Image (tube, coloured by chain):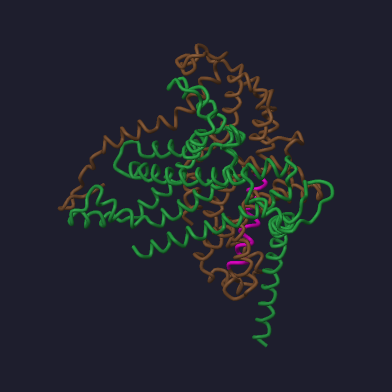
Chain colours: A green, B brown
Amino acid sequence: MASLAKSKVGAGRDKTFYAILIPILILFVAFNTIPLITGFLYSFTDSKGYGAFNIVGVQNYIDMFSDVRIGNSYLFTFKVAVVATILTNVISLVLALGLNSKIKFKSAFRALYFVPQILGALVVGYVFSYFFTYIVPALTGTSSILADPNLAWIAIVVVLVWQSCAQTTIIYITGLQSVPEDVYEAGSLDGATGWNQFRYLTLPLIMPSVTTNMVLVMKNMLMVFDQIVAMTSGGPAQSTESISYLIYNNGLSGGQFGYQCANAVIFFILIAVISILQTRFLNSREEQL
Amino acid sequence: MAKDAFGAKVKEKVNWPVTILLLIGLITIIFPLYMAVVIAFKDGMSTDLAGILSLPATWSLDNFIEAIQVTDFFNSFMNSLIITVVAVVVSVLIHSLAAYAIGRNMDRKKLFKASYYFIIAGMYVPFAILMMPLVKQTAILHLDNMVGVMILYVVFYMPMDVMLYTGYLRNIPIALEEAARVDGASTWSTYWKIIFPLMKPMHATVAILTGLAVWNDVMTPLVIMGGSGVNTLPLAQMSFQTAFATDYNLAFASYLLAMLPMIIFYIFAQKQIISGVTNGAVK
């Protein structure tokens, strides 16, 4: 009898858990999985986003590979993402080492260096757009790099790094704080100071933070959009069209709905593969150390 | 405070070179904001650098008053506020509940474990691929408005939030719930009376991360309700960009207004925001 009563209660509990899980799953499927599948299906059509369309098989995917504009958007996005990710991590690590040392006004410094994180990327983009259009040329006597198809990407990198250093630095500080003081004391007996201390003691011990930051920043950078809208609208001469911007621009108002869905599918696969590979690679380095 | 070999307290030496370097480095953070402030308070643009960057002769609020009117600031502000508050509150309630159901069952039931990985995998889905189908879908469902945007945020931040909550739940001993069950409490009331309050630190993290991201997001409202005349703060900046084309004083006043709510919030909740962002990333 006792076991019967118990199993009844157990069934009641399970019912509650299912009653919670299922509606939430339905919500998730409705606004995440279904659009993902629809997007995938549209990628096999010549839909303009409105009216009738035909099924064209894998034609969109074939066309993509000879599309210079799409090719350039991938080159631009990866160039910006790689450069900005490396710069962000190097600067943030240096900044974190500084902010974690025995300095005056420590908490004030940390609070101020964190400010870019809370500001909206769009408005920051507008401010930097002015900075690169008027202030920098006035200082250097050259024309604005935002007007130069070969240099405009640098302005995008600068604004991305300016904003993303805040969170990255805080994560590095947390990593540095987790290194016990006696590791340094023991190390200093063996002559590990300065660069050697950093290279052989600190860096291996904060590898988990490096992993987190590299993956996090890289993923955000690959999806760059707001800064492009604010600073260049993809110009000059389409030299700063990021993948997200091109999908948005041509997919929603350029009559390339089906075609840009194919682009988005490739983009999705790339993001997933890169994030997974990066995590695997950096995790394996962690274990070796 | 460090101690010397005999256990006596030694006053730690302040590293002044690093302090000074950090002070110099702060210029990179402060300069863009300084530039925004001095331009926003000025009337008319100077052509030389000194003129642009000097402090205004008189601190006039005219640009701000005009910017408030031009961008319909209070309406956009209220819309942003409503969207953010609703998205955050619903996320905290629903995502923590989902994580509870999943976390307490994923080790014994396949469906819950599969659901966990299914939802978490959503983190790898860029908005770019959902965007186009969602524009159609929300239009069909008559959700191409603020309600639709709020629903989408609750769905988009579900993967991250469920992961954070599920991780946190591992540290809450199951014995507490078992004790409540022996006393005859249902799963539902056990959750709200015992588990939900215990997850308070994680609620703060989730609220900060979701809130910051939603408040500053451009893309979702842009594609879902862009052109409808209903603006969020970032959308208002975008819509009136053409009006600002020639008037930088007005533009910068408007940018500052858009940043102001978050800066004020940061001044008051600085510690919570920093620790929220850190906890969220480090897990």
**Residue farthest along the front direction in this orientation:** A66
Q: Nearer the viewer, residue B37 or B12?
A: B37
Residue drawn at x 50%, y 43% is A80
Is B99 covered by the magenta stretch? yes
**Horizontal side, residue A141 vs residue B153: left or right:** left
Q: Is residue B131 above or below residue B48?
A: below
- Residue drawn 45% across and 15% down? B50
Q: Position of residue A62 (x, y in %)?
A: 67, 54
The answer, for residue B212, to whether it is visible in the render is: no
Using the image as rendered, state which of residue A54 and residue A208 is in the foreground.
Answer: A54
Give the image location of residue A86, x and y in percent.
Answer: 43, 46
Overall secondary structure of the magenta stretch? Answer: helix
Q: Residue furthest left?
A: B6
Question: Measured from the top left, where is residue B210 in percent x and y?
Answer: 59, 48
Q: Which residues are magenta?
A: B85-103
Residue B257 image offset from top left, x and y in percent:
59, 28
Report the front residue among B142 and A137.
A137
Pick the front one: B189 or B51: B51
Q: Quadrant of residue B116?
A: bottom right
Residue B239 falls inside the magenta stretch: no
Note whether residue B131 is visible. yes
On the picture, is A144 further left or further right than A70?
left
Tell me the residue at 17%/56% (across/down): A189
Within the image, what quadrant is residue A18 found in?
bottom right
Is residue B27 placed above or below B189 in the rendered structure? above
In the depicted structure, whether residue A187 falls above or below residue B150? below
